[in-house]
Amino acid sequence: MNGKPTGFWGKLRKDGHLVVEWHPLADHCADVAAVGEALLSRTILRQRLARLGGIDDLVPSQTARLCVLMALHDIGKHCVGFQNKSLARPSFVCGHVKEVLALIGPSGYGESVRLMAALPVADLKNWGPGDTALRLLVSAIGHHGRPVAIGGTHQSHHWAQGPEPPREGDGTAKPDRARNGSSFDPFTGIADLVLRTRTWFPEAYAPGGEPLPDTSSFQHGFSGLVMLADWLGSDTRFFEYSKPEDGERFAGARRRASEALRETGLDPAPGRQALGPKSPDFGSVAAFPPRAAQKRVLELPSNPFGSVSVLEAETGSGKTEAALVRFLRLYHAGLVDGMYFALPTRTAASQIYERVVKAVSRAFPDDSTRPPVVLAVPGYLGVDGKRGTPLPHFEVLWNDDLEQRYRYRGWAAEHPKRYLAGSIVVGTIDQVLLSSLEVGHAHLRAAALLRHLLVVDEVHASDAYMTRLLEEVLVHHCAAGGHAFLMSATLGAGARHRLLAAGRGGASIPSLQDAIAAPYPLVSHRPLGDPVVLSAVEVTGDPKRVAVEIVPWMDEPHTVAAAALNAAILGAKVLVVRNTVRGCIASQKAVEALARARGKGDLLFACAGVPAPHHARFAREDRVALDGAIDRSFGKGRALGGCVAVATQTVQQSLDLDADLLITDLCPMDVLLQRIGRLHRHPRERRPEFEPARAIVLSPADRDLSVSIWKDGNARGAHGIGTVYDDLRILEATWRSLSAHPLLRIPDMNRYLVEAATHPEALDAIVAELGETWSRHATTVMGRLLADRRAAQLNLVDWTKLFGEYEYSPRELERRAQTRLGEGDRLVELEAPLPGPFGQLFRKIAIPAYMARGVPPNSVASEARVVGGVIWFSFGPHRFVYDRLGLRPFEEPVSTEEDLADA
């Protein structure tokens, strides 16, 4: 509708203070209800919700009643204060959620009586036991990201019929008349909307019918469904504003809803039908025959009521393809509608994304029926390998000529809150964990996730806080009959048992002896409601042999540089992995200085011809360039000749790198095995001087790690000892195991190595041997671990709380929870695009939360300038430098053009 509203409006488009177009409120409610109906009829969400309600499925009368409640989600917009937002100079405005919830319940307000008269209260009482339907209505009304309790402050003038209250100091306020010529009566508008729902969903009001479930988890799940329906039903690409000649909206809304689900990929039917009648085999995702672990995964049953599976296998064994074929089989069977592939880092997610795009293209050769593959990494905007460009007002430009196809397929990629609403999604684990925390739109994330096979790679990489959150995600996911597939090369027995036990109480950890005796590789599978089934995986071929040498060079970057460069001169590909960015940069400078002095600059890893380290503190455009460069130098198709690359943990997960020599800081055994996984990853005819593979482990000069343990039991030393890796018991156990086994056989020794360095019995033995200092440290570490788990517990969504009684904790706790997951990092935008060190223009760069302490929320970068290839800028009170060595505070030394001479 053009011009000023002439009736209750639900959506507006303004030019300054002037309304240029509006969408009737009843029509918007029709759009959302139609999307909700389509989601319940065309996706697996109906069955997932039913399971949360303690039943197997919802019958038509139940779904119709839920659709009515979704149609009433915005009844609060009828209030005068909200409708006043269309005026150029309103005397007052208000919201539409708390305002209407203040009238629900035994408040005694006159407006409450009128609201109850307008709502179909008598019908609602017949839709479920007690106040079930009313609480579901409350969960629908609280669809703006956070549950809101009923009651609260009430102001009569928000709902007054007729004139607005006088403006302050002005007794001449004019009445705000209804746009249809009669008095502006909110409750008449609500009653009219209820009347419309009787024609839209007559089955909802028919006598009898099955009652709606009354569980709290069903209410939480329904709230997420309403959020998803509202997001999609508000998108004008699918639901244009009504025009005067349109007539009744609902029939058209149903058609648009079906189109929206199909175009965004939320409707799984086209993709499922494209797979054909036969269950997909391994050839659907890969051109090579399945390996032993992949065969075991192919044998897993498709349980109709959900499952949790854990695949433990060495790096390079094809776990990604195993997960993909597991997804295809469940998808084909109608047991999932999509997949979320969760990785520990953004770099890992970006790397796996390309592999998933290729595999999905192989499984679905016809791109017209292929489900969209979304990259769920903030700032990347990726769908099906295409890249989008953000535009103002949350719009996105997709660079594609096929009738703007990606304008719709990329819907889920365009906003982090709806990443999980994609079809096949590759992203970071934090997006999944946010579905369990008291943060905005957690219910939207949780409901969207219920559709998916949840795949978590590198599941061992989470700390105690994140592990507790993942356990909670699995509890909720499993309660709805969902499926999960967890993968790790180095998972400890305790973590495996906790994850497999999610949702069925605590699980005892096996003894150290039993843990070491467990097969490896291993597939563990728990059909929900049944015991865990363990399947050993046959190991074929000769084990990879890795010669390990421990040297006290942690504080000697020049010694490290000499060892790395000497190996590269012999033709080796050398990865130097340091625990911290500071250590990485120091080693990079040392290698460069030595290479210049010896005329071997051509042996340095470079991006666009510029020597650089590989770590996370680069702008997105430069990270993409660095990933491509290191793949060309160290990937499966690597060129001949030696090369030295200095990096941090960014290269140890998910990157398909193949090195001859690894030089690494001492780190926990499970992390070390990940780094060792980059050695001899692919068969080569010739590896000069490096058969078997070699790993040089850098240790402190002092063999006694207790020198880093403080009086309070905390540990703090250089190179991540006590900081990046805070449990020195594990570092001590790792050091001992490596000293006792200078030649590793992978994967034969994986189980022993991990358990000997991480199992509680092994750690207790170290403490008992080494005495009081270590006992104090163990107490501190365990206290911190328990505190982290308690902190996670405090921030969890309480699925047992009924809607109407539940509100989130203070927003300060929400901010802290997001910061713990890395969501507190600040994405800083420069005033204008600047050339990065590798020739890429960039405008945004992430600053770690700890580097941005004290910076107000709305701060922007300032004083940006480029001098000699180095970018300097300010952010709040802090000064930063950005160049080929990455982002760092101004206080640290920076590179100059002189550093690049002869390199």
Image (cartoon, rainbow, N blue to C red):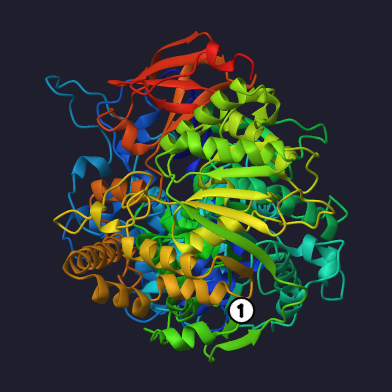
Q: Residue furthest bottom?
A: 531
Question: How packed is label 1: few (under 14 Cα within 10 Å), some, or many (20 or more)?
Answer: many
Image quadrant holding the C terminus, namely: top right
- Position in image of residue 647 (x %, y %): 54, 40
Q: Nearer the viewer, residue 687 or 3?
A: 687
Residue 597's place in the image compared with 356, above or below, is above
Q: Nearer the viewer, residue 899 or 19?
A: 899
- Position in image of residue 512 (x %, y %): 42, 84
Q: Residue furthest left?
A: 169
Residue at 72% x, 47% y: name it.
354
Numbered disc total: 1
Image quadrant holding the N terminus, namely: top right
Q: Nearer the viewer, residue 81 or 152?
A: 152
- Position in image of residue 675 (x %, y %): 57, 55
At mark 1, the secondary structure is loop
| Camera sees residue 230 | yes
Residue at 27% x, 36% y: name it.
162
Q: Amino acid at mark 1?
A: Tyr
- Position in image of residue 808 (x %, y %): 28, 56
Question: Which image quadrant for residue 434?
Answer: bottom left
Q: Label 1: which residue?
A: 520
| Camera sees residue 242 | no
Relative placement, left or right, of 28 versus 356 is: left
Question: Which image quadrant for residue 456?
Answer: bottom right
Question: Which image quadrant for residue 682?
Answer: bottom right
Residue 340's place in the image compared with 475, above or below, is above
Residue at 18% x, 64% y: name it.
773
Relative placement, left or right, of 49 versus 424 is: left
Relative placement, left or right, of 884 versus 330 is: left
